[in-house]
Amino acid sequence: STVNCLTSFVSGFVIFTVLGYMAEMRNEDVSEVAKDMGPSLLFITYAEAIANMPASTFFAIIFFLMLLTLGLDSTFAGLEGVITGVLDEFPHIWSKRREFFVLGLIIVCFLGSLATLTFGGAYVVKLFEEYATGPAVLTVVFLEAVAVA
């Protein structure tokens, strides 16, 4: 968790440093260079930074391996939270069938994420980002506060 958070923190510094560098090289404002918002800004910024480095192929491979491991780490943490909560709540049902429950949960997650791989996948991600994340996070935080209280 610490490495995950520190990587995100350092990534922010790198992104904005590269944006400043790109703005300086193009003689534009940072707001003109960073027209894209959201996740696409990361890929544009890092691609530009990596392209200007010596041994850019090596750093590109390392960068995408880092993104892969960060994504897997975040996914495992979220899934393990759901799995542990359900297994603790219903031990009489799932205690001997944990593997089947985990398999079923992963299949449901896989099927739910297939919509993001279509041509309109970026729009689906944008819809989730705009309308689903805020209320869901607020609901979870509220329920956690009630549970702790």
Image: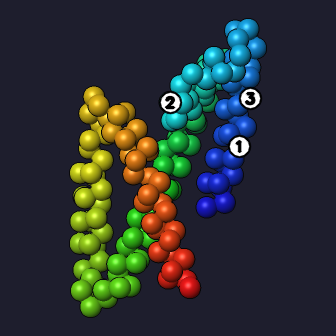
Question: Which residue is located at x 35 percent, y 85 percent?
Answer: 89
Residue tagged 1: 10
In the image, what residue type sits under mark 1?
Val
Instruction: Indicate left or right for 93 with 19 as reference.
Output: left
Q: Earlier in the sequence, mark 1 or mark 3?
A: 1
Q: Compared with residue 2, is residue 14 higher up or lower down, i.e. above or below?
A: above
**Mark sitting on residue 84:** none
Secondary structure at numbered mark 1:
helix
Image coordinates for residue 81, horizontal then vertical, percent: 44, 70
Q: Earlier in the sequence, mark 1 or mark 2?
A: 1
Q: Nearer the viewer, mark 1 or mark 2?
A: 2
In the image, what residue type sits under mark 3?
Thr
Residue tagged 3: 17
Alpha carbon distance from label 2 to label 3: 17 Å
Alpha carbon distance from label 1 to label 3: 11 Å
Q: Earlier in the sequence, mark 2 or mark 3?
A: 3
Seen from the viewer's position, the closer of residues 123 and 56 is 123
Residue 105: which quarter of the image? bottom left
Question: Which residue is located at x 58 percent, y 36 percent?
Answer: 62
Alpha carbon distance from label 1 to label 2: 18 Å
- Labels 1 & 2 near each other (Cβ < 8 A): no
Furthest residue toward top: 27
- Labels 2 & 3 near each other (Cβ < 8 A): no
Residue tagged 2: 40
Image coordinates for residue 61, horizontal then vertical, percent: 54, 32
Residue 127: which quarter of the image? top left
Secondary structure at numbered mark 3:
helix
Quarter of the image with the N terminus in it: bottom right
Q: Compared with residue 37, is residue 51 higher up or lower down, i.e. above or below?
A: above
Question: Which residue is located at x 24 percent, y 86 percent?
Answer: 93
Quarter of the image with the C terminus in it: bottom right
